[in-house]
Amino acid sequence: MKKFLSIIIFLVLINPAYNQEKHHKWQRFSGNWNISDSNASELNGWTLVWNYYELLDYNTIITLQPLINFNSIDVSAAINKRVKSPSEFMISFAVTSESQSWFYHMYGFKFTGGLWGMDKVSFIYSDRLDKTKPFDAKNNFFVKELASADCKIKHDKIYNFHIAFEGENVVLFINDEKILSAPFPDKKYDGRIAVSARNVKIAVDKVTAKQNDKLIFEDDFNEDSIFVKVIKVKKVPDNTNDKVQEKNKP
């Protein structure tokens, strides 16, 4: 019964269909996200590990709606404070789900580093390992590195991360400098986009997505656009022992 209730609460926490308002553009998976001074900041740095799928093992916000027919993403963000090493920052896209609440399938650029900042970026792919298992099976996912490159990202400095789909390739630019280009394995890259961090505090200034010159998504975080489901739990006294004693009376 305890496991069943845990799964119910978990589903409610990550399901975007619960009472979000019109100004909400994101849902929170995990982490302590706060919007102030036109930034979405993750204040914990440390991360809970659920072992269900890659995005959930980070402090993550994900768009409430999938993006269709876009071919570029821009994220302006600062990596503010490392909590421990390795520190990781990730921009994910083509995030899709076979079920409403389980986002296994994703591609992304994952930045890793340590004390002085980020020094490596990997183009990764993640999905379910065994699709015959139920969605709530733990450790049933893989993360595959498709390509990697060196990079140089310092703490407490705002960078613009530009992701563009050019022909059959996905290309990463940092402050207009081309860092990594790799073949994109799928024909389509529609889906949600996500911003994540682990072992480091970040501040996201702006996120946009375009179809050529047409803006199809924008958030400058001038208002609280992150939907967070709050669950109030009422503690019920456990009288199990009393009932057992009463049953065992002679």
Image (cartoon, rainbow, N blue to C red):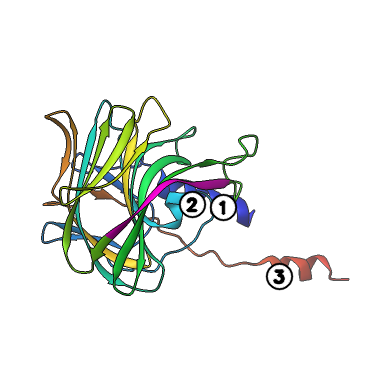
According to the image, label 1 marks what residue?
Answer: 5
Q: Earlier in the sequence, mark 3 or mark 2?
A: 2
**CA separation in Å, label 3 and label 2:** 28 Å
Determine whether the residue tagged by mark 2 lies in a helix, strand or loop.
helix
Residue bounds of the magenta highlight:
141-151
- Residue carrying label 2: 9
Which quadrant of the figure has residue 78? bottom left
For mark 3, what is the residue?
A: 242
How far, Cα to Cα, is label 1 from label 3? 23 Å
For badge 3, the amino acid type reads: Asp
Q: Nearer the viewer, residue 12 or 204?
A: 204
Is residue 87 visible from the viewing direction of this image? yes
Count of all numbered marks drawn on residues in the image: 3
What amino acid type should be assigned to the residue bearing mark 2? Ile
Please state which of the two labelled residues, at mark 1 or mark 3, is closer to the viewer: 1
In this view, 212 is above or below 164: above
Tags 1 and 3 touching, CB below 8 Å: no
Q: Amino acid at mark 1?
A: Leu
